[in-house]
Image: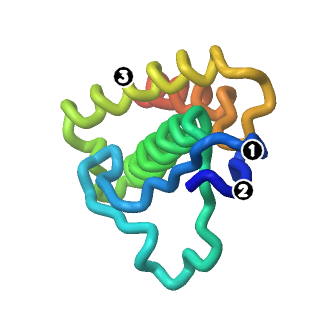
Amino acid sequence: MDAGSCNACSTAGTPLMKLSLGKDFFGRTYDRLSPSSDQSPKWYCEPCSMMKNLQRDFRDIRMEFDKLAKGQASALSEPEAKQRAQLRLREIAAITGGQPAGSSLLNPADVTQLIDQFHTRA
């Protein structure tokens, strides 16, 4: 799609994309086009699309960490998944730390906070 502008940074005149089908960080299938709640799809330029993917991984890890912290069943109960999640969080922190300030998609401080929470829980 070339018309319109990026829903995250408002860049216009560049190819835009929407990732709708795929797997989340833990390998679970998701489909964002089918739900009736997706009445106003959002489109992103390439850099914002990458940030959106990082945001999705962060959100998935945060959700599983919150379950683990509450004593609920969590994908992070498996040591390998927990280690992979911690590595991904460090990757996300490195990438977001190098991004221009003010990204509306992912706050680097939130990523750092979750990394710290992983360390205090270990």
The quadrant in which the N terminus is found is: bottom right
Residue topped by disc 2: 4
Choose between 76 and 69: the one closer to the eye: 76
Q: Earlier in the sequence, mark 2 or mark 3?
A: 2
Separation of residues labelled 2 and 3 (CA atoms)? 36 Å
The numbered disc on residue 12 is 1
Hey, what amino acid is under mark 3? Leu
Q: Which residue is mark 3?
A: 87
The residue shown at (48%, 47%) is 56
| Relative side of 86 to 100, left or right | left
Which residue is most to the bottom?
36
* Residue 90 percent coordinates (x, y): 46, 20
Q: Is residue 71 left or right of residue 8?
A: left
Q: Residue 107 at what x, y percent from top left?
A: 68, 34
Q: Are marks 1 and 3 in contact (CB under 8 Å)?
A: no
Give the SS element for disc 2.
loop
| Amino acid type, mark 2 | Gly
